[in-house]
Structures are given as structure tokens and as C-alpha cells.
Image: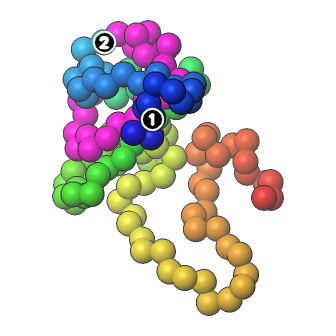
Amino acid sequence: ATLNPGSMTKTGWQTKMVPPSYLRDSEAADLDPYAAIILLNVRAIDARAIRNLEEYVSKGGGVAWFLGAAGMTPSEIQRLDQQLFKNNQGILPFSMRAQTDLVAADSTEVVPDIQPESHPVFAPLLGQSN
């Protein structure tokens, strides 16, 4: 409903729902017209789909990956981490292996919840303040 709230609301988004196999079975250039690719509850992805996503992201495309409420097994997390984070060289700007519970701050000092690494996605933001 968020990306398709009804015919009377103009969001600027036109959604197209396809199975994850679309990323594998399509050519990389077929992804170019999309402003963003949102993956929901995708627990595994094959090598060709990853290559297509890597090419799409290298051209400026955006990818959001929502793992879902069911969570993932440690082996699924490790596999996706190896395929998508690639020791800070993949399309994910962080490792999925380090799950951390966020805790409430003890003081009024505002601190970030994450510490950006030297991944290319953070390059325009490093050294700047909010």
C-alpha cells in the first residue's frame, strides 16, 4: 500500500512486482529503467542475478533489501554476506553478519547508530556533519 496508495494519489512511483528469478533471467540492461529495486523476503540469490544487480548499482541504481519478519538462518546470512558485501567490495555497504541490538542512549548526547566504513556508497558523506 505504501508504494501504491490508490489511483487518486500521485507518488511518482509505478510499481512492478516480479519474482526474484526476474533478476536472473533478464539482461542487466533490462534493469536500467527502474529508479530502485526493492527485494522483499528474498533469502537466496544466484550469481547471475548478483552480477545484474552489481551492474545496475554501478550505473547509479538503488537497491533496498528487506529480509522479512521470519529472519534468516546463520548460514543464509553468511552466504548473502559473502555474495553481496564481499569484504566491503560488494553492493552492500555493511556486513549482514554483525547483528546488534540498539540500546537507548544513557545521556542527551546524540550519537549515530552506525559507523560508516570506507565503502564507496558512503564516500560523499564521509568527513561531513549532520
Q: Is residue 18 found left or right of 31 in the rendered image?
A: left
Residue 19 x/y as whole percent: 23, 26
For disc 1, the marked residue is: 5
Residue span colored magenta: 27-47
At which x and y percent is residue 21?
22, 23
User: 101 or 124, which is in the foreground?
Assistant: 101
Would you say 128 lies left or right of 74 here? right
Q: Residue farthest to the bottom?
A: 106
Query: 15 and 118: which one is in front?
Result: 15
Q: Quadrant where the N terminus lies?
A: top left
Which residue extends farthest front? 8
- Three-letter residue code for mark 1: Pro
Q: Which residue lies at the image location 39% right of the left edge and 64% below the top edge?
A: 98
At 79% from the left and 54% from the top, the residue drawn is 127
Q: Residues within 10 Å of mark 2 (few under 14, many from 20)?
A: few
Does residue 42 appear in this view? yes
46 is within the stretch colored magenta: yes
Q: Residue 85 is drawn in which quadrant? A: top left
Q: Which mark is residue 26?
A: 2
**Mark 1: which secondary structure?**
loop
* Residue 57 seen anywhere in this rendered image of the structure: no
